[in-house]
Amino acid sequence: MTTLKLVTEPDPRFGAISDRLRGPFDKVTKFDETLRDIERDLYETLDVANGVGLAAPQVGIRQRICIVRVPACYEYEDSPETRLTLINPEIVRAGGQEIDVEGCLSFPDLIGDVPRYLAITVRAHDINGKVVKIKARDYVARVMQHEIDHLNGVLFFDRMTDWSTLHYPQSDKAEPVTARPPAD
């Protein structure tokens, strides 16, 4: 396994975001050992980064692959571990909505309030190319939406409705601002 280098970008309030995270990204058509290697490397990178989700474009792989790994008891005392590899995923059903704090490995330490669906159904391929449907709720649904957004070139702050919530909670790198940055 290999730990891959994360693509990081500047604070979106102060700099344009490159096309490295904006796409377009290619559909996966070959389900082979190369794809399994990418999956292993994504999980290794996620572990080192201490994250809960990672999309291939975040490590410079311009394909529609993402992973989700939410540890057991992460959300609730008795919640099970969730480990998913989603290839060419699309949300086919969604309902409910909540606003909660999100961050992103490509924007280290930056967080903000993001509205997301509470429950989703996703159609995707698994690592062997089999079409699967996955239903998710609450935090797992949020992580899945965040990673699928990456595959569509959408970043968490693109979904924000209140830019004053975008900030660095553990430092004084930048003060929260209320204005949205200029478009790329």
Image: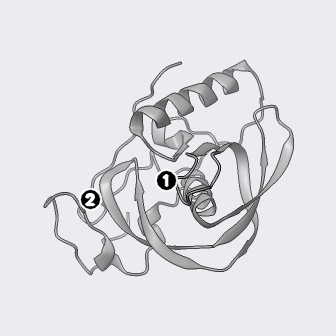
Amino acid identity at mark 1: Arg
Q: Residue furthest right?
A: 130
Q: Quadrant of residue 143?
A: bottom right
In this image, 98 relative to 88: left or right? Answer: left
Residue 15 badge: 2
Q: Residue furthest front?
A: 77
Q: How many neighbours does mark 2 have within 10 angstroms: few (below 14), some (14-19), or many (20 or more)?
A: few
Q: How is the image coloured?
A: one colour
Label whose residue precedes the other's in the sequence (1 or 2):
2
Image point 23% across, 63% down: which residue? 14
Quick check: 159 above or below 70?
below
- Report the quarter where the C terminus lies: bottom left
Image point 24% across, 61% down: which residue? 168
Amino acid identity at mark 2: Gly
Element type where label 1 sits in the image: loop
Give the number of callouts: 2
Quick check: 152 above or below 92?
above
List x then y, in percent, for residue 70: 56, 48
Element type where label 2 sits in the image: loop
Given residues 75 and 31, the one toward you in this image is 75
**3D distance between C-alphas at marks 1 and 2:** 14 Å
List x then y, in percent, for residue 92: 78, 65
Image point 49% across, 20% down: which residue? 2
In this image, 137 relative to 181: left or right? Answer: right
In this image, 50 relative to 124: left or right? Answer: left
Q: Quadrant of residue 167?
A: bottom left
Given residues 82 and 144, the one toward you in this image is 82
Quick check: 49 above or below 107?
above
Image point 54% across, 35% down: which residue? 61
List x then y, in percent, for residue 112: 36, 69
Residue that badge 1 annotates: 22
